[in-house]
């Protein structure tokens, strides 16, 4: 491990100190970080569709490198097609702890890797591109590299049709484990055809709670036809078809042998791949075209976030100009915080307080705002929540200009 070495040029006189002709010089050889790596989760593959070129393809995040020196640390995001970084290219530099690349960027890297989507040619439609982060101090100071992260890029083969080819336009899912849908057809969850034989979409899932519903299992089932209970596809159906099913699901062993969710309540990206025969869960993803890939929420009325940027709440783009996520909200309690109002604010950029959008902003833009919100009339004119504490589906529709809670 490198140590800090201080070189000082001092001239000692016999009876005292003489003045130095040159300033003292200090050379810092900083301590290399013991742990420095990516902190975000990566997908097993990245299916790249040109119509989504403007969307975020991946947001690389990492823990800060600590060189034991009070100085600015810079970070390069590097890519390599060869994998050994002999062809290394810096695709972004920052002093922050994140850098994003768009689907358009990834499409460019796929072309660099020799991929194409023509099923007639010999070139593959799937390939790997390697990435790593270089942390460094100054132009010639110390540096450290993360481990190499490989991303598998996939170009859906061109079948002569501009649209994905699936037997169905979408799959449907209802059930108590998907509280936005429940056991009914008023608001079923839809998993759209997102690739040849692939259905996917964001969904909010909750596990079973025996103390709440001792006689019922929180579960759900897929359907091929909206409103048709007879079109249901349960856990044994997919099991019998040879599917590999995500370990966060199991046979609920209820009357209809539905899917039971075993994970932590939250937002997930669910994919049913009828070609590779897999059902998988991943982190929530951008699934639509919006000016931003997400909005952010912080504030004391959203206790999972609070007034800080450690755990802000992402409101993901999942439609044309529509942002939505589940969020825990609490109302103001004057007896607890008499001098403060429990409130929150939207932000367009993570970590940037100047990007805040408060209640008067949306009011001035002509939005119809859910009556469970009002202007907190605090210093920043934030949103105050007037309902009962709980988990809600928060939707901001920038086209219809509405902010709604469910």
Image: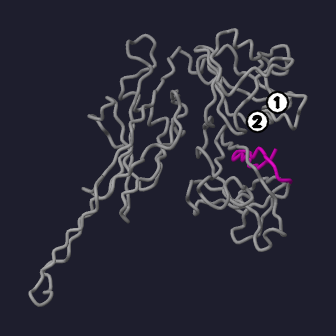
The label on residue 206 is 2
- Report whether residue 48 is seen: no
Can you say whether 103 is above or below 365 in the image? Answer: above
* Between discs 2 and 1, the one toward the N terminus: 2
Disc 1 designates what residue? 218
- Looking at the rendered image, the quarter that the C terminus falls into is top right
Dominant secondary structure of the magenta stretch? Answer: strand
Can you say whether 270 is above or below 385 in the image? Answer: above
Residue 269 horizontal/vertical position (percent): 64, 32
Question: How many callouts does the rendering have?
Answer: 2
Q: Secondary structure at mark 2?
A: loop
Residue 179 shown in magenta: no
- Report whether residue 400 is seen: yes
Q: Nearer the viewer, residue 376 or 359?
A: 376
The residue lying at 63 percent from left, 50 percent from top is 295
- On screen, residue 165 versus residue 377, left or right, reads left
- On screen, residue 292 versus residue 154, left or right, reads right
Q: Secondary structure at mark 1?
A: loop
Q: Quadrant of residue 124?
A: top left
- On screen, residue 11 versus residue 345, left or right, reads left
Residue 11 horizontal/vertical position (percent): 12, 80
The label on residue 325 is none
Can you say whether 327 is above or below 141 in the image? Answer: above
The residue lying at 44 percent from left, 19 percent from top is 125
Task: Say if mark 2 contacts mark 1, CB within 8 Å.
Answer: yes
Q: Which residues are magenta?
A: 388-406
């Amino acid at each position: 491990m490198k140590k800090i070495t201080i070189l000082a040029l001092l001239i000692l006189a016999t009876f005292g100190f003489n003045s130095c002709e040159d300033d003292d010089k200090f050379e810092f050889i900083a301590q290399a970080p013991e742990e420095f790596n990516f902190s975000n989760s990566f997908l097993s593959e990245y299916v790249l569709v040109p119509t989504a070129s403007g969307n975020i393809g991946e947001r690389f995040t990492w823990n800060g490198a600590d060189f034991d020196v009070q100085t600015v640390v810079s970070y390069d995001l590097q890519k390599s097609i060869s994998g050994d970084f002999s062809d290394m290219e810096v695709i972004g530099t920052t002093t922050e702890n994140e850098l994003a690349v768009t689907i358009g960027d990834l499409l460019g890297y796929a072309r660099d890797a020799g991929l194409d989507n023509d099923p007639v040619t010999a070139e593959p439609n799937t390939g790997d591109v390697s990435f790593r982060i270089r942390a460094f101090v100054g132009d010639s100071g110390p540096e450290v590299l993360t481990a190499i992260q490989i991303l598998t890029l996939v170009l859906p083969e061109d079948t002569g049709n501009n649209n994905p080819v699936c037997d169905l336009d979408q799959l449907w899912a209802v059930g108590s484990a998907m509280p936005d849908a429940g056991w009914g057809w008023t608001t079923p969850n839809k998993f759209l055809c997102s690739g040849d034989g692939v259905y996917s979409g964001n969904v909010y899932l909750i596990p079973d709670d025996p103390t709440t519903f001792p006689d019922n299992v929180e579960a759900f089932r897929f359907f091929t036809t909206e409103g048709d209970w007879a079109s249901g596809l349960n856990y044994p159906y997919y099991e019998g078809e040879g599917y590999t099913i995500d370990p966060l699901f199991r046979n609920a062993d209820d009357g209809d042998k539905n899917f039971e969710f075993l994970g932590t309540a939250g937002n997930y990206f669910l994919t049913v791949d009828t070609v590779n025969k897999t059902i998988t869960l991943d982190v929530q993803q951008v699934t639509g075209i919006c000016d931003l890939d997400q909005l952010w929420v912080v504030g004391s009325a959203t206790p999972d976030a609070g007034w800080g940027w450690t755990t802000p709440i992402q409101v993901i783009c999942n439609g044309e100009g529509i942002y939505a996520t589940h969020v825990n909200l609490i109302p103001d309690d004057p007896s607890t915080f008499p001098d403060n109002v429990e409130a929150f604010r939207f932000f367009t950029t993570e970590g940037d307080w100047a990007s805040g959008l408060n209640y008067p902003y949306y009011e001035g833009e002509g939005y119809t705002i859910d009556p469970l919100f009002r202007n907190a009339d605090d210093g920043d004119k934030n949103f105050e929540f007037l309902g009962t504490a709980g988990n809600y589906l928060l939707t901001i529709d920038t086209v219809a200009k509405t902010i709604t809670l469910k």
